[in-house]
Image: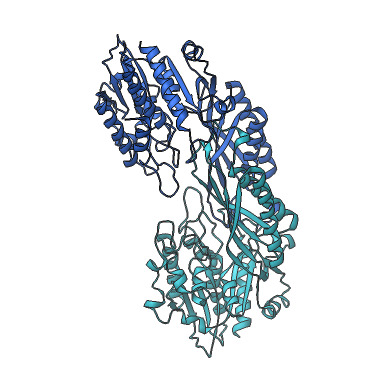
Chain colours: A cyan, B blue
């Protein structure tokens, strides 16, 4: 079973014929089909699968214990809405291919090697990214998660058993001595330096903020332009200001979601709510970025006769991956070490104290979370070999 | 039954306790309750009610025929979502009060006088304003309307019988010799000239346009600002350009509705769709306004690496009300004659060839389509007297 065969088997699962985008929301039919593929690949290799109370699967080559901890790799199989083929699956397929490569080398690990399939990494159904790994590590308490609901009102507790039903909720975590996640790069840093594989140094701090712009609902025809209190104008100016501010400072700011009340074509809105995704190279830079955006939004609100209120919905500090581990992997092989602006299960496990590293595979266009996301097969195979080398290094 | 008593009876129907706004979407419980109030007021005055195949009610004092046509007044009882108390109901309540005043004066009309309650004037449930009057006049064909659906997927044909079930679909129209609609002003023109009542000269041309901005969906964290093709930026710039263009030219332009795909906080959108409501004093001015907005949107799209496509969803030309009738009503009484930027059933009946006039009642703030919409009771009573005078003039 080659990398290419596995890739071809998994590729059609949850792919929209209309757009070519993936719709693998966790615990829906398409994503369950991907998990069934995972189970079949584990069975083919005689791996022992553990499924925890949150739906995460961990498959072991060998039998780890708290005193003989294993080296875990893997990633996730869920996608954002209309996402691409590589984000998540590349790490899982590469894990199987790396195990095959180690076995073909005749390698006999002195520590168990595991492959994880985490659930709801993208936060595309329940509104929190890395949900499975947050719950497994205890970084998120079950009582704060069980009532999380999807757009149809289904609660997380309706789709996973949770620790009440499964007292040993995520006991597999005590068996993990190190975690290495391979992931398609979501930018062009490796393309810029012309290298197929790199190692992550850190994850940028990241915040999600809700901005409520309020004005006065009014008639779109009869209200003179100069008499309006139109929050859509304040929103629009804030979108442009956020973009400019992020560009000038080398950080990131995005408005990807907006809601309008009442949302009538023929009415000036009473309220516009926009969500700001902001990321920066340090907590200080993130704070400065958001402060600058909020200040410009407030200035424009004064001019528009509107009001704006900013609420931080979630703010994550920087994640620094295990520096010694990154050096150990990168230096002998001459791999570049680079930061990422995206959240990952690896960031959660690192935050929970597991020595963690990430490998990135080159993405020529840098496009991500899109049907156009792509990595050439030669680079994917280089990634498999890199991952096999790392696992051999750590499980020797 | 005084104006104030009727106003107090109708005021709570469909009003939200939370916001004070009205939710009288047509053919829902709240609006049906308002129609039941209408029927009771008709019965109290021994008016003969005709209900047509589209749900419109017309109540007659007297018995009109095609050879002895009546003078029709009235308005509508439905509201925009979270609308105000006056838009529509003021014309209906004033009509009953005017009939009472005529009777108390001992006036015996030589032509029948009717009171109309049109349905779905606001287009707040089915996506077309003046739906009842458009269907009654035949300006909109039933076959083009029967499949119009509300947000829950209910078709118009599910809630009204339509002409298949009722061959004499809107025969009452042949009994109408003139229509006079009284309406709260939706701007401040009467307040500016300090007059309680005015007469409409025309309705401005009005268009609704859908603008589809397309870019490239991408990751909100990892995509460098300079690598993006973000249609939200093009949308935002277009909102600001439309506002500025309308301000400079003395016209109107509004973005009150926007939809984002995929609409994720952590993703650069692939598509943003905004709806432009534009109105101007002439068809030429409207075309110039929309052209200028489209040109600026296109220029910005070039800079953003996005594309924009503008689709006219509906464009209505100017409505000129019967000039002789407006002069006959306004000149002897010294009422100001002014244009309006809002659509009305009166515009539809005028377009269908019915000699039509509109009376406006002063709105001190000009606020409309909002819970804050208001007219002082003295002005409302002046409106009742003006309407009674007009009906007496026309039915003498």
Q: Residue furthest front?
A: B105
Residue B177, position in %: x, y?
Answer: 36, 13
Hey, which quadrant is residue B189 in on the image?
top right
Residue in the image at 60% along x and 72% along y: A347
Left or right of B182 on screen, residue B114: left
Q: Nearer the viewer, residue A329 or B210?
A: B210
Residue in the image at 54% along x and 72% along y: A74
Left or right of A368 on screen, residue B118: left
In the rendered image of this protein, does residue A347 appear above or below residue A298?
Answer: below
Left or right of A365 on screen, residue A143: left
Residue A287, position in %: x, y?
Answer: 68, 63
In the rendered image of this protein, does residue A355 appear above or below residue A358?
Answer: below
Hey, which quadrant is residue B235 in on the image?
top right
Residue in the image at 63% along x and 48% along y: B230
In the rendered image of this protein, does residue B355 appear above or below residue B266?
Answer: above
Residue B52, position in %: x, y?
Answer: 29, 25
Q: Nearer the viewer, residue A98 or A121?
A: A121
């Amino acid at each position: 079973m080659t990398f290419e065969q596995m890739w071809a088997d998994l590729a059609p699962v949850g792919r929209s014929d209309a757009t070519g985008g993936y719709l693998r929301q966790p615990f829906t039919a398409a994503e369950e089909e991907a998990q069934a593929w995972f189970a079949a690949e584990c069975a083919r290799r005689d791996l022992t699968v553990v499924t925890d109370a949150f739906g995460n699967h961990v498959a072991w080559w060998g039998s780890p214990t708290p005193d003989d901890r294993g080296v875990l790799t893997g990633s996730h199989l869920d996608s954002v809405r209309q996402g691409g083929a590589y984000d998540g699956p590349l790490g899982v397929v590469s894990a199987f291919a790396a195990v095959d490569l180690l076995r073909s080398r005749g390698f006999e690990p002195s520590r168990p090697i595991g492959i994880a399939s985490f659930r709801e990494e993208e936060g595309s159904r329940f509104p929190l990214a890395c949900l499975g790994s947050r719950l497994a590590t205890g970084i998120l308490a079950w009582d704060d998660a069980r009532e999380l609901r999807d757009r149809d009102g289904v609660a997380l507790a309706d789709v996973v058993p949770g620790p009440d039903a499964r007292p040993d909720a995520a006991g597999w975590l005590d068996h993990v001595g190190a975690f290495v996640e391979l992931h398609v790069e979501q930018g062009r840093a490796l393309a810029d330096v012309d290298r197929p594989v790199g190692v992550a140094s850190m994850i940028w701090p990241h915040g999600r903020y809700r901005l409520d712009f309020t004005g006065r609902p009014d008639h779109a025809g009869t209200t003179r332009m100069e008499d309006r209190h139109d929050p859509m104008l304040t929103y629009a100016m804030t979108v442009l200001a956020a973009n400019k501010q992020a560009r000038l400072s080398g950080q990131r700011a995005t408005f990807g979601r907006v809601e309008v009340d009442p949302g009538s074509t023929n009415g000036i809105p009473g309220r516009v709510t926009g969500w700001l995704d902001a990321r920066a190279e340090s907590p200080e830079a993130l704070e400065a970025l958001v402060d600058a955006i909020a200040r410009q939004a407030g200035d424009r609100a004064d001019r528009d006769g509107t009001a704006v209120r900013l609420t931080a919905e979630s703010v994550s500090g920087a994640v620094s991956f295990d520096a010694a581990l990154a050096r150990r992997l990168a230096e002998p092989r001459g791999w570049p070490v680079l930061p990422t602006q995206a959240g990952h299960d690896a960031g959660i496990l690192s935050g929970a104290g597991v020595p963690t590293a990430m490998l990135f595979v080159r993405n020529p266009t840098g496009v991500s979370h899109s049907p156009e996301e792509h990595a050439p097969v030669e680079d994917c195979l280089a990634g498999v070999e890199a991952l096999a080398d790392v696992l051999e290094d750590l499980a020797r």
